[in-house]
Amino acid sequence: MPNIKSAIKRVKTSEAAHDQNIAQKNEMRTAVKRATTAKENNAENVDALVSEAVKHVDKAAKKNLVHTNKAARVKSRLMAK
């Protein structure tokens, strides 16, 4: 544990940011999974789920949680199926 006050604050903020990043990444994965299963099962709300997944993927790519090429690949796979 750091002794300097600013370092202690930095540890707190970095842990909070880490938790937020993980939560956003998990939301993205869940949205993509929901969209793919809906496409496989021919659900009636496929378009809404795909657009929601694309939105989450774009947000994650914008915040550098996933690489932009990975985001493009995931979106392409969602659209192709």
Image (cartoon, rainbow, N blue to C red):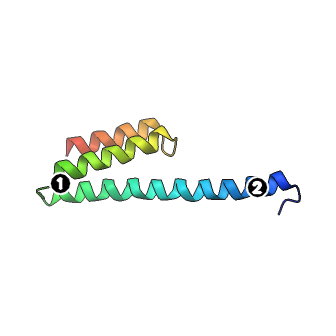
Residue type marked 1: Lys
Label 2: few (<14), some (14–19) or many (≥20) C-alpha neighbours in 10 Å: few
- Nearest to the eye among marks 1 and 2: give it: 2
Q: Taking 44 as reference, is 71 above or below it?
A: above
x 53%, y 53%: residue: 21
Residue type marked 2: Lys
Q: Position of residue 25 (x, y in %)?
A: 46, 54
Identify the residue under disc 2. Answer: 9
x 15%, y 55%: residue: 45
Q: Position of residue 22 (x, y in %)?
A: 52, 57
Q: Position of residue 16 (x, y in %)?
A: 62, 58
Q: Secondary structure at mark 2?
A: helix
Identify the residue under disc 1. Answer: 39
Residue positioned most to the right: 3
Front residue (pair 69, 50): 50
Q: Are marks 1 and 2 in contact (CB under 8 Å)?
A: no
Quadrant assignment, res 20: bottom right
Front residue (pair 8, 73): 8
x 27%, y 59%: residue: 34
> How many angstroms separate mark 1 from mark 2 (CA)?
45 Å
Task: Point out the tag, 1 or 2, that comes first from the N-terminus.
Answer: 2
Front residue (pair 39, 12): 12
